[in-house]
Amino acid sequence: MDFKNLTINKIKEIFQEVDLEDFYSEYFDFLKKGNQEIQAFLSFTENLAFASIKELKNKNKNLPLWGVPIAIKDNILVKDERCTAGSKILENYIAPYDATVIKKIKEAGAIIVGKTNMDEFAMGSSTENSAFFPTFNPFDKSRVPGGSSGGSAAVVGKGLVPIALGSDTGGSIRQPASFCGVYGLKPTYGVVSRYGLIAMASSLDQIGPLAKDLDDLILLFEIIRGKDELDSTSVEFPKEKIRKFEIKTVGLPKEFFEDLDSNIANLILSRLKETKVTLKEISLKYIRYGLHCYYLIMPAEVSANLARYDGIRYGQTVKGELWEIYKKARGEFLGKEVKRRIILGTFVLSHGYYEAYYLKAQKLRRAIFEDFQKAFKEVDLIISPTSPCLPFKLNEKIEDPLQMYLSDIYTIPVNLAGLPALNIPIGFINDLPVGMQIIGNLFDEYKIFEFAKMFE
């Protein structure tokens, strides 16, 4: 049986003739063999999968994801399964409950096949910061798959699973989706519940879907969206926004194209010219400060969220006096990048620096949001590159944090403004995939989907 590059519709056709258990008995062998090439899974959930199969046999086959395999980023809780967040400090942590998105996909009939590799606590742009091992790009094993949702993007890009879930704090779904040649959506902030997501920066984090097929991504988004009483920041998606849109004008921010690699810029522009929309140059004057703003707000929230991993309540436990427990647990089991961001965030929030740094960053964040709002009065959507570069080599940037941070320069402003954005694959340069980012105003996901369909 050929399992590679299956879509949801193809899988449903297979199940008209093939038994679920027979399918998955062979499918897990296919997954494990494929994973040896890219090292994208941290664990396989076979016991859960076959338990779900038994339950599914008594359920309606018309469920939207009946029998469909899905991979889950390892910072999203799946009950009774290991959830490490890519960190040694949570290496043995077993999730006590399902995240809201997991409940929803189970109810839709999906089969969870494994937890995917990621940068530790979602801090990174290459999946090299995983405490366990790096993941390889499915198009070139010498290159990174992006991050922090690199594992989820790689298994979809490799054609091992049709759909996956990731999380996006500053581009962690869209950038790896670009590097792995797949679709990846960062929804409007609050549209998808964060309950059961291990927090990095709570005002920026958002769970979202990845898929090889655009229709599959839309379907997964429709299943996981919605207000959740367990997440006070969640919102109901407006019904009036679920419709077809006419896209007449798209904006090209000059700040996003000024220093862009000419090969990437030319590919984006050539693909845009294939559509009938009007291209309009716009300016987002505060966007150039997005990276500076992000690396003040995000570490501050990281410092607060990761304080719980103290060797007492959560994570690996060590013996000793109170200070020794803190020092040993956090010193030994947290990685270099995580420590770097905790230290920076603690400094930003400390007495005398809160007003100088954190408060100003929040004001700048508001200015970036208003910049976008002004632009959306002139254009229907905004187009940008997803990444300033092609997938880079393993170990190329790992010792240069600033260069690594610059990998998300085009995606970070979207998180700061809480807007939706979708990476779509638009072609190849030197046999490596290139992605384009479509940015919409709040709750403009269906407008984004409508425009994305023009490129299929």
Image (spheres, rainbow, N blue to C red):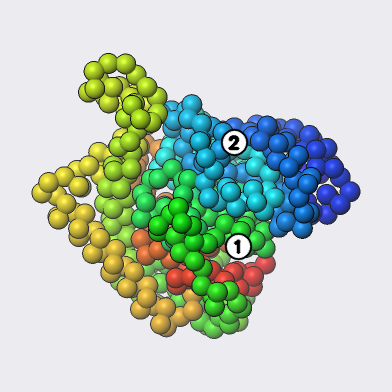
Query: What amino acid is found at the position of numbered circle 1 in the picture?
Result: Glu
**Residue 295 drawn at (x, y percent):** 30, 51
Towards the viewer: 105 or 243:
105
Q: Residue furthest right?
A: 17
Mark 2, residue position: 41
Residue depicted at 43% across the width and 54% down the height: 231
Is residue 125 left or right of 334 when viewed as pictured?
right
- SS category of the residue bearing label 1: helix
Is residue 128 left or right of 297 when viewed as pictured?
right
Q: Rate crowding at label 1 as few (under 14), some (14 to 19) or many (20 or more) other CA atoms within 10 Å.
A: few
**Residue 224 drawn at (x, y percent):** 57, 57
Residue 1, quarter of the rendered image? top right
Residue 41, quarter of the rendered image? top right
Mark 1, residue position: 222
Residue depicted at 56% across the width and 38% down the height: 79
Does any portion of residue 413 appear in the rendered image?
no
Q: Mark 1 or mark 2: which comes first in sequence? A: 2
**Residue 95 drawn at (x, y percent):** 51, 35
Towards the viewer: 449 or 110:
110
Nearer to us of marks 1 and 2 is 1
Residue depicted at 71% across the width and 32% down the height: 33
Is residue 296 left or right of 280 when viewed as pictured?
left
Query: What amino acid is found at the position of numbered circle 2 in the picture?
Result: Phe
Is residue 352 left or right of 177 when viewed as pictured?
left
- SS category of the residue bearing label 2: strand
Residue depicted at 37% across the width and 65% down the height: 417
Q: Residue furthest left?
A: 352
Does any portion of residue 46 appear in the rendered image?
yes
